[in-house]
Structures are given as C-alpha cells and as structure tokens.
Image: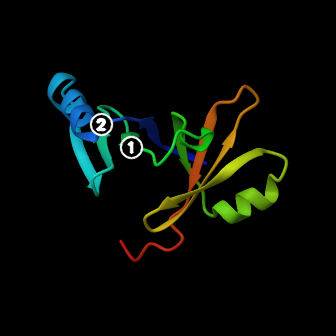
Amino acid sequence: MKLTFVYQPVKDLKESVSFYRDTLGFEESWREGETTAAFTLPGTEVELMLDVPPDTGPRWGAGAFYAVDSVDAFRESHPDLDWQGEIEMPGGKGATFLDPTGNAVHLFDQSTAGPA
C-alpha cells in the first residue's frame, strides 16, 4: 500500500478550488470533470484530492487513498474488514473499508489504465 492522496469531500468544487489555490497557495495538478480536482502538496509526492461525492455514505468519508496492485486481490485477502463498497475510478477500481473507529480507508488500483 502506498499513500497517494489525502481525500477531502467538498460541497462546492469551484469554491473549494478557489480556497485551496488562491487562499492557501496550493498548485492544482489535475482535474476530473466538474467534481474532482487535485493539488500538489509541497515537499511530498502525496496530493490533496477534492471531490464532490455522489452521496454522504461512509465510503465517501475524508481519509487517505492508498494505491495497491489489485483492489480485488486485497479484498480477497482481507475479507473480515468492514467493506463499504466500491468507488468508480478512472483507469481502475476503488474500494473503501472502515477502520475500527469508523474512519474511511480508501484503496485504488490502475488495473484498466492505458500505458503512461
């Protein structure tokens, strides 16, 4: 597992992008449609991902996104975790489980992404 993103759900992407870019001075690194944007975090390879989630369920809680080789393989090898469901991810799969205190832990792979 490699920490890749700090996930922050937001209500309004435009307002949130403005805050993180203009007020805090973060540099936008990429955007996915009208609901997701990411920022580089100085001094690290980890990015801040802002996202307007489709609902307020626990699988959309703030937390870390970890890259794994295969979400399916991870789920198979950890069936006793409190799995909350899958997440649609461009180029791959995502899934979320809750830690013992109810915090969201997000996983993703790039299993269907094309060559870089």
> In the image, is residue 16 above or below residue 97?
above
In the rendered image, which residue does mark 1 sit on? 52
Res 25 quadrant in image: top left
Q: How many marks?
A: 2
Nearest to the observer: residue 115 or residue 82: 82
Query: Residue 61: image x %, image y %?
Result: 55, 36
Query: Residue 81: image x %, image y %?
Result: 79, 45
Q: Hey, what amino acid is under mark 1?
A: Val
Query: Residue 115: image x %, image y %?
Result: 39, 76
Q: CA distance from mark 2 to mark 1?
A: 7 Å
Label drawn at residue 91? none
* Mark 1 neighbour density, 10 Å: few (under 14) some (14–19) many (20 or more): some
Res 41 quadrant in image: top left
> In the image, is residue 114 above or below residue 85?
below
Query: Residue 76: image x %, image y %?
Result: 79, 61
Q: Are marks 2 and 1 in contact (CB under 8 Å)?
A: yes
The quarter in which the C terminus is drawn is bottom left
Query: Which element type, helix, strand or loop, lies under badge 1?
Result: loop
* Mark 2 neighbour density, 10 Å: few (under 14) some (14–19) many (20 or more): few
Label drawn at residue 12? 2
Query: Which element type, helix, strand or loop, lies under badge 2?
Result: loop
| Left or right of 43 on screen, residue 9 | right
Nearest to the observer: residue 35 or residue 68: 35
Nearest to the observer: residue 17 or residue 116: 17
What residue is rendered at 44% in x and 72% in y?
A: 113
What residue is rendered at 30% in x and 46% in y?
A: 37
